[in-house]
Amino acid sequence: EKWLPIVSCRCFVCKYSRCQISVTQPSAPKSVSIGASVTFSCSTGSDVSNYLNWYQQRPGEKPKLLIYYTSNRYGDTPSRFTGSGSGTSYSLTISGVQSEDTGHYYCQQGYSSPFTQ
């Protein structure tokens, strides 16, 4: 059985006093077998009215937008990626993990500038 490193990162990009909305993800890495499902959680410091985006960053690559406005797949994002949530609590689920899904997954609020991640 092959296991893949799937990493979730907790990031704070609030650098200035004008930054109001914090975004938090659990920092523990996840190891998932191919074909299994994995869910990442994301919480915001206040209600972002579903303006929540998810990005994937594969090793050696730039971040790529997967999901926008909570649940809308962007571009050619595969159907195995599903976003859900509301208010201050959101999640990204990968159903049937593939080898190319290895990487970091970030959530970003798009409700209030600056858009924190």
Image (cartoon, rainbow, N blue to C red):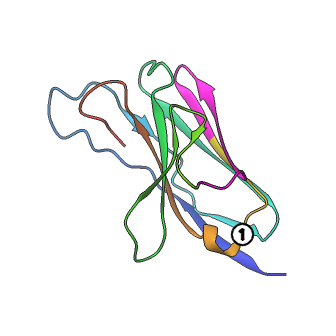
Q: Which residues are magenta?
A: 77-91
Q: Secondary structure at mark 1?
A: loop
Q: In this view, which residue lies farthest toward the bottom?
A: 1
In the image, 40: left or right of 34? Answer: left
In this view, 81 is above or below 87: below
In this view, 99 is above or below 117: below
Give the dominant element type of the magenta stretch: helix, strand or loop: strand
Q: Which residue is mark 1?
A: 98
Q: How many marks?
A: 1
Quadrant that contains the N terminus: bottom right
Q: Where does residue 90 sit, x and y in percent of width and height? A: 58, 33
Q: Amino acid at mark 1?
A: Gln
Q: Tell me, yes or no, whether the highlighted magenta stretch contains residue 79.
A: yes
In the image, 21: left or right of 88? Answer: left
Q: Where does residue 64 sit, x and y in percent of width and height? A: 44, 58
Front-lying residue, 58 or 73? 73
Q: Going 42% across and 20% down the picture, which residue do you hit?
A: 46
In this view, 86 is above or below 56: above
Q: Going 45% across and 39% down the picture, which residue do you hit?
A: 24
Quadrant that contains the C terminus: top left
In this view, 51 is above or below 81: above
Q: Going 62% across and 67% down the picture, which residue do you hit?
A: 101
Q: Going 78% across and 81% down the picture, which residue do you hit?
A: 2
In the image, 97: left or right of 115? Answer: right
Q: Where does residue 83 sit, x and y in percent of width and height? A: 63, 39
**Label 1 crowd bin: few (<14), some (14–19), many (20+), radius 10 Å:** some
Figure quadrant of residue 84: top right
Q: Tell me, yes or no, whether the highlighted magenta stretch contains residue 54.
A: no
Q: Where does residue 113 sit, x and y in percent of width and height? A: 25, 29
